[in-house]
Image (tube, rainbow, N blue to C red):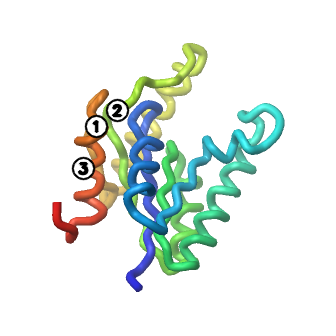
Amino acid sequence: MSQPRLVLLNGMPGAGKSTLARRYRDDHPGVLCADADDLRTAIGGVPADHDEATQRLVLALAAAHLASGYDVVVPQLVVSPEHLARFEEVALDAGAELVEVVLHGGVVDSRVPDAAVEHLVEYAHGLADLLVHRPGTHRLATRHGDVDAAYGALVDLLDPDLPA
């Protein structure tokens, strides 16, 4: 069995993180899609109040699945080095490779409310800073409405030895 991978699909809202992660999962038996948005809705109360609990659940699911020898794809906006270090630790502990992919552009319509736009600027700056300090991060350009092209580029990146 090959080394499992923890694939972090990072990017701004609407870039296609969840869409691409689910499609990759659907086309690759055994791959777990650990989506914080899905887990957040499984916790009672106001979803925004459960960010830390949700993050712990994502990391625990990833750790368990990687330990079983399978890949995990996590579609999540990660802008802080501390947050990223948690993913690195999970991958290291499981003997897995951490593959960081940042999606640029938009595949789907953004679902961000107007009140959150100010935070988006902070996130964009944090993401740009992260890219500067992590030269091994893969960058994948996406275009609104072209999920197939974005998915093809993701598969080419993650599975380069498979026939097209």
Q: Earlier in the sequence, mark 3 or mark 1?
A: 1
Which amino acid is tagged 3? Gly
Tag 1: amino acid: Thr
Give the alpha-carbon distance from disc 1 to disc 2, as whole Å: 6 Å
Q: Position of residue 11 (x, y in %)?
A: 42, 40
Q: Is residue 164 left or right of residue 147?
A: left
Residue 112, horizontal then vertical, whole percent: 53, 23
The residue lying furthest to the right in this view is 45
Q: Is residue 48 above or below residue 85?
A: above
Q: Is residue 156 left or right of residue 135?
A: left
Pointer 2 residue: 107
Q: Secondary structure at mark 1?
A: strand
Residue occupied by mark 3: 152
Q: Residues within 10 Å of mark 2 (few under 14, many from 20)?
A: many
Q: Name the mark nearer the viewer: 3 or 1.
A: 3
Q: Determine which of the numbered discs, if any, sits on residue 142 in the image.
A: 1
- Give the residue type at disc 2: Val
- Given residues 50 and 24, the one toward you in this image is 24
In which quadrant of the rendered view does residue 150 lie? top left
Q: Quadrant of the N terminus?
A: bottom left
Residue in the picture at 30% in, 28% down: 145
Residue 75 vertical position relative to residue 65 in the rendered view, above or below: above
Q: Position of residue 87 (x, y in %)?
A: 54, 62
Q: Which residue sits at x=24%, y=50%?
A: 153
